[in-house]
C-alpha cells in the first residue's frame, strides 16, 4: 500500500495490491486465520469517517505504532476487508438531481448476465441480488427525471432477462457516517 506525500492513506500503486471494484470484481477470499480484533475495527471506523486520514493520525488514535497501523491496513486491503477508498458525493450538487432505487424481477439464472449489462449503464451506483418480492435492487443517480425515465424504460427494461421494474424515487438522502 502506498501513502500520499502528506502521509495520508492512499490506494496501492498500480500492480501492488489490486483493490477490487465493489461491484464488478469479487473480493479475495478472507484468510481463515485472520479475524478482526478491536484495533482493526477501530481503524475501519476511523477510515469510514475519513478515508484520507494519515497513517500517523490513525496510529495515534488507536494507540499503535505507525508501522503496525500501516501493516493492519495493508492486511485488511489484501484480505478484501477494505475494498478501496472513495469520496461521499452530494449528487444534487454534482448535477445528478434524480436519485431512485429500481427493483427488478429477472428470469431465473440470468443474474450474472443481467448484472454485467446493468454495470454498463450510466448512473448505476449500486446493484444487489436480493430475496423477496423482487430479485435485484439497484441505486441510480441521473441528471433529471427525463434521464431517469430513459435509463429505466429505454435501457434497463430492454435487457434480456429483465421481466419487470419498479422505480422508487428518493426525495431526500442521508448517509450514515460511523460514530467516532
Image (spheres, grey):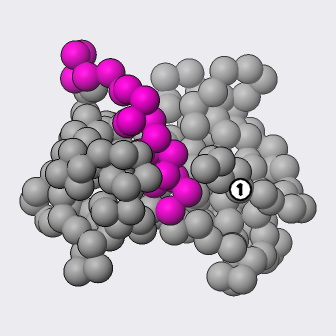
Above-or-below relation of 135 to 127: above
The percent position of residue 105, horizontal first and vertical second, equals 69, 32
Does residue 151 appear in this view?
A: yes
Where on the picture, by quarter, is residue 113? top left
Q: Is residue 72 shown above or below 61?
A: above
Residue at left offset 72%, top offset 83%: 93
Q: Residue furthest right?
A: 171
Q: Nearer the viewer, residue 154 or 79?
A: 79
Q: Residue furthest top?
A: 32
Q: Residue 133: give x, y in percent of width and height.
A: 78, 23
User: Residue 43 vs residue 14: left or right?
Assistant: right
* Image quadrant where residue 57 sits: bottom left
Q: How many marks?
A: 1
Q: Which residue is mark 1?
A: 175
Answer whether residue 32 is magenta in the image: yes
The residue nearer to you, when weighing 86 against 4, is: 4
Please indicate, yes or no, whether residue 139 appears anywhere in the rendered image: no
For the stretch drawn in magenta, what is the main secondary structure?
helix
Depth check: give the residue in front, 23 or 56.
56
Q: Is residue 117 left or right of residue 167?
A: left
In terms of depth relative to the viewer, which is nearer, 135 or 55? Answer: 55
Residue at image location 46% in from the left, 41% down from the top: 42
Q: Position of residue 143 (x, y in %)?
A: 71, 78
- 171 within the magenta span: no
Label 1 environment density (alpha carbons within 10 Å; few <14, some 14–19, many ≥20) = few
Residue at (37%, 55%) from the top-left corner?
Answer: 60
> Residue at (71%, 56%) from the top-left corner?
175
The residues colored magenta run 31-50
Give the percent coordinates (x, y) of residue 1. Answer: 18, 57
Residue 43, picture quadrant = top left
Secondary structure under tag 1 reads loop
Amino acid at each position: 500500500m502506498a501513502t500520499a506525500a502528506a502521509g495520508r492513506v492512499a490506494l496501492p500503486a498500480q500492480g501492488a495490491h489490486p483493490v477490487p471494484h465493489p461491484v464488478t470484481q469479487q473480493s479475495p477470499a478472507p484468510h481463515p486465520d485472520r479475524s478482526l480484533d478491536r484495533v482493526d475495527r477501530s481503524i475501519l471506523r476511523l477510515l469510514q469517517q475519513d478515508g484520507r486520514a494519515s497513517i500517523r493520525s490513525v496510529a495515534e488514535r488507536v494507540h499503535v505504532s505507525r508501522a503496525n497501523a500501516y501493516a493492519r491496513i495493508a492486511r485488511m486491503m489484501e484480505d478484501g476487508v477494505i475494498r478501496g477508498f472513495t469520496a461521499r458525493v452530494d449528487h444534487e450538487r454534482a448535477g445528478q438531481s434524480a436519485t431512485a432505487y429500481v427493483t427488478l424481477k429477472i428470469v431465473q439464472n440470468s443474474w450474472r448476465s443481467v448484472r454485467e449489462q446493468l454495470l454498463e449503464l450510466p448512473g448505476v451506483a449500486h446493484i444487489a441480488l436480493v430475496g423477496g418480492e423482487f430479485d435485484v435492487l439497484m441505486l441510480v443517480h441521473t441528471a433529471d427525471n427525463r434521464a431517469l425515465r430513459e435509463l429505466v424504460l429505454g435501457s434497463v427494461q430492454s435487457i434480456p432477462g429483465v421481466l419487470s421494474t419498479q422505480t422508487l424515487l428518493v426525495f431526500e438522502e442521508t448517509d450514515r457516517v460511523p460514530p467516532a
